[in-house]
Image (cartoon, rainbow, N blue to C red):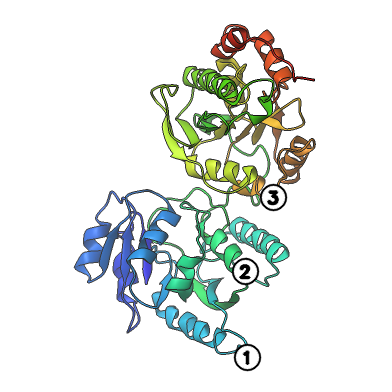
Amino acid sequence: MVLPCLNEAEALPWVLSRMPAGFRALVVDNASTDESARVAADRGAEVVAAPTRGFGAACHAGLLAARSEVVCVMDADASLDPAELSRLVGALDGLQSVSKAEEPVRPGLVLGRRRPVGRGAWPPHARLGNAVLARSLNRRAGTRLHDLGPMRAARRAELLALGVADRRFGYPLEMVLRAARAGWRIAEVKVAYRPRTGTSKVTGTLGGDSPRRPRHASRPAGGHPVSAAPAADLVVIAKEPLPGQVKTRLTPAYTPAEAAALAEAALADTLAAVAAAPAGRRTLALAGKPGAWLPEGFHVIAQRGGGLAERLAHAFADADDGRPLVLIGMDTPQVTPALLARACRALRRADAVYGPASDGGFWLLGLRRPDVRLLYGVPMSRSDTGTRQLARLEAAGLDVRLLPELTDVDTAADAAAVAASARRGRFAATVRMLGVRSIPA
């Protein structure tokens, strides 16, 4: 039994006292600052340390540490009763006994379908957000689920083989989505859901999988007072500027090495603008390794995901620290600290800020309450990418503020135009040094 735990010293005694016979409690301490680890150990639980914060990181650490064939996962905040786990495991065994004799047995996943007990157990806006997300998942994956709750049972080896990558609060949704696409049998068992013990640490989730308020699900646009607005964080998503791997559309006008030099200059100018802009935290979501072009003061995280939309979504999720987030790429070296500050200020009143690019994409996206659902599935690198992304924001009922249109540096013509419009940066100097080029006839 895996119990992801962040500062649950108050709830753990009741949770551990309710553990059914035959279940072993494995408390995953996610860098708690209270006595959670000691309380768990004193009551006979095995304690595993997961120092990297994030619900998904704690779940993954628990799965790796578990030794039983079947594993269960549930919150450690006393909102769910471990005594009901036996019913989930029984349903899991039932799922794998219904395959036809001539068919291989398919993996199974059982979810606890929450039924609120007691006043305030599951606020209406949280229930609505969860229902909306469940319906969306059903359409995408062909499932018939009512809830994406945090009490689950599956077989450990099969669950690890799914390769769930999210290490924050998108983990529960990704698990179900991957399981459905892999053809797993998925079932629900009704479980009681009570008001949690202690103070919630979660401000929002990818999937509405938590009793806490989801970030966008049913929140009216513009419903946050300006005085409560925290400072925005800035995130740059970029590739290590290596020849042949970046700015490939600059060739053959420029050689691969020259294209990489231009990419490094564009990235350096972008990072310099971010470093000079007011921000809560500055993060670089990087594919590759940092180089001498990286200034001090940046938190570096590795990019995750396949396509660009997925990598953008993961960058938002991995950089999310509870504040508004503004994300840009490395293709607009003409960006200025003043323009970034304008984007951050916009999120004091608006839900989102959006910078269109001249090629039909976008060069900046900022969200007051980051929600990766706003990016998943948007087709990238197309002439209508920006239109589709903006439509996704507006369809979610968000108040969106627009920034000026900028030109992404993709082609030799783009490089010349951007260098001419922003002549003081390293990028413009590199273009002048290499010379303005055109594609050979």
Q: Mark 1 points at which residue?
A: 102
Q: Where is residue 35 in the image (x, y as percent from the top left)?
A: 24, 55
Q: Name the residue under label 2.
A: 180
> Does residue 142 lie above or below 426 as drawn?
below
Question: Quarter of the image containing the N terminus?
Answer: bottom left
Asked whether 310 or 151 is in front, the reply is: 310
Q: How crowded is mark 3: few (under 14 residues within 10 Å), some or many (20 or more)?
A: some
Q: How crowded is mark 1: few (under 14 residues within 10 Å), some or many (20 or more)?
A: few
Look at the image and tell me whether residue 194 can be seen: no
Q: Where is residue 108 in the image (x, y as percent from the top left)?
A: 54, 77
- Res. 377 mark: 3
3D distance between C-alphas at marks 3 and 1? 36 Å
Quarter of the image for residue 80 reads: bottom left
> Does residue 63 lie above or below 365 as drawn?
below
Image point (52%, 73%), residue name: 112
Look at the image and tell me whether residue 90 can be seen: yes
Q: Which of marks 3 and 1 is nearer the N terminus?
A: 1
Q: Which amino acid does label 1 sit on?
A: Glu
Q: Which of marks 3 and 1 is in front?
A: 1
Question: Quarter of the image containing the C terminus?
Answer: top right
Task: Tell me: 238 left or right of 29.
Answer: right
Q: What element carries label 2?
A: helix
Q: What residue type is labelled 2?
A: Ala
Q: What residue type is labelled 3?
A: Gly
Q: Is mark 1 on a helix, strand or loop?
A: loop
Asked whether 216 or 426 is in front, the reply is: 426
Q: Where is residue 200 in the image (x, y as percent from the top left)?
A: 43, 53
Q: Earlier in the sequence, mark 2 or mark 3?
A: 2
